[in-house]
Image (cartoon, rainbow, N blue to C red):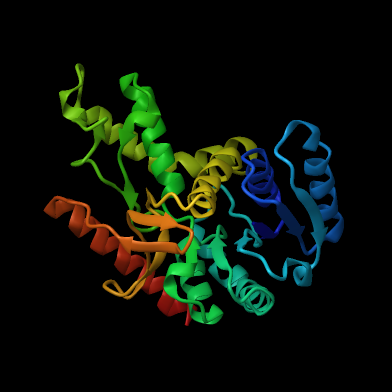
Amino acid sequence: MKISFIGSGKVGAAVAYTASLKGLAQEIVLTDAFSDKARGEALDILQGQAFAPQAQVKYGDIKDTAGSDIIVITAGIPRKADEPRVLLLSRNAGLIAGLVKEAVSYSPNCILFMVTNPLDVMTQLAYQVSGLPANRVIGMGTVLDTARYRSYLAEQFGIDARDIDAYVVGEHGETMVPLVSQITIKGIPLTELPGYETAAVERVCDEVRMASGQVIALKGGTVFAPAASACAVLEAIVKDSNQILPVCTYNSEYGVAVSLPTLVGRNGAGPVLNLPMTDGERAALEKSVANIKAFVAELQ
């Protein structure tokens, strides 16, 4: 398994490092517009190989990604704390389109994994310019938001986050939709927990929406949770586990790339699964889709 990273900034390097610790690839290639940055990150990961699963860790330029099974694109200009993700659109669109085309020319059989913001629009762009089928162009989507949701619910109610089944769907952005009606813990509805309060869940939903901006304001960028979330998707692909994750893919029903619970395995993402929603949640999802569509229209 060869996984290549286009972009070796904080998030790209953290995803590569986490992937190496999980033993997800036999070959890892890091690239960056600043070659010394890619070289430094590759050397840093390589120097820990005595205590990690064995892999060839290399650096280079985009031609060195040739023959990759998975290409992870994290390149782009990072978001500021008070900045909506979509303002990154004009800065990142041309860059990402060029990188996607070039990467796919070297690895025509790859799965593209998009981590660059604005995530939904960049996934749509990658799908349009790559020529790859929709199942092989995957955005991290609301996997990260879902991780935050489950973690905050666990903290609020004093339970193991790994036992929680709850999803955030729609846009990876301001109109994300934390689904409340279907939250369960090992199949038991959250409402059955002692001390359950609707107001507490509503507070958690607000915290999830503010989570990224809060961390950016405090430390300059989100790194560890994105890396863990991205590697959950990579692991599902590498191990062909058919894990259900709310990744972002082009959805023909909605006519745009959007995050919904989806089976993820070695062939990519799909099919999308039908998750029951209330009328209010469905309306919120439609609003979120409309927001993505508006930005995609601006992209065109």
Residue 263, picture quadrant? bottom left
Nearer the observer, 297 or 193: 193
Task: Identify the residue at horizontal 36%, vertical 26% (top origin).
Answer: 154
The quadrant where residue 48 appears? top right
**In the image shown, does 247 or 19 lie closer to the viewer?**
19
Horizontal side of residue 98 vs 41, given as left or right? left
Q: Is residue 172 visible?
A: no
Q: Position of residue 226 (x, y in %)?
A: 55, 45
Q: Is residue 12 visible?
A: yes
**Spot occupied by residue 237 in the image (x, y as percentages of width and height):** 50, 55
Q: Position of residue 97 (x, y in %)?
A: 60, 76
**Residue 155 versus residue 13 in the image, above or below:** above
In the displayed structure, 198 sits above or below 206; it is above
* Residue 143 x, y percent position in the rendering: 43, 48
Which quadrant is the N terminus positioned in?
Answer: bottom right
Which one is nearer the viewer's eye here, 75 or 238? 238
Residue nearer the viewer, 237 or 206:
237
The residue drawn where x is 54% and y is 39% is 225
Is the residue 39 above or below the residue 46 in the image? Answer: below
Q: Residue at x 49, y 80 (%)?
A: 128
